[in-house]
Image: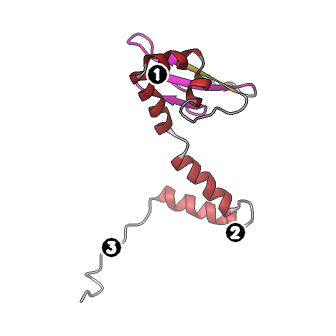
Amino acid sequence: MLDAHDEPHQKLPSEPALRTKALESLLVEKGRVDQAALDALVDAFENNIGPHNGARVVARARMDPSYKQRLFNDGGRAIAELGFTAMHDEHLVVLENTAKAHNPSPPLCGNFSNGSMSAEAHSDRRHCS
């Protein structure tokens, strides 16, 4: 039988995680955020949005030269082939990285970046530079 000293210690979440949870709880409690909507947003970012999508695009472009050319010619249409869509008013620009030119993706734009390609989604209402 375990006594109090033998029980495994529970690891506490990090300070940012605790602060995030406290803020989330306060916003839900005050009625500023709907918990279901917040859960749906978190789920979308964890499962549907993120660098893993760009990795799929880059992998396809590496394996399929005709897809790669379609990606450079019309990025939005090419990513649609994989089930991805840009925002309704965005134009996806895809650039190839070379030994002489690396095209970083701005962190706040809809984008993906990989060692071989970068892409930016530009909107009519905002400009990512």
Part of the protein shown in magenta: 95-124
Secondary structure category for the residue under label 3:
loop
Residue at the location (70% across, 68% down)?
29
Q: Which residue is mark 2?
A: 29
Q: Is residue 103 above or below residue 11?
A: above
Foreground of the two, 114 or 25:
114
Q: Residue 117's mark? A: 1
How far across and how far down the image is residue 58, in percent?
45, 27
Residue at the location (74% across, 25% down)?
124
Q: Earlier in the sequence, mark 3 or mark 2?
A: 3
Q: Residues within 10 Å of mark 3 (few under 14, many from 20)?
A: few
Q: Is residue 82 above or below residue 100?
A: below
Q: CA distance from mark 3 to mark 1?
A: 45 Å
Residue at the location (60% across, 34% down)?
108
* 80 drawn magenta: no
Q: Which residue is mark 3?
A: 9
Q: Quadrant of residue 5?
A: bottom left
Type of amino acid under label 1:
Met
Secondary structure category for the residue under label 2:
helix
Foreground of the two, 123 or 2:
123
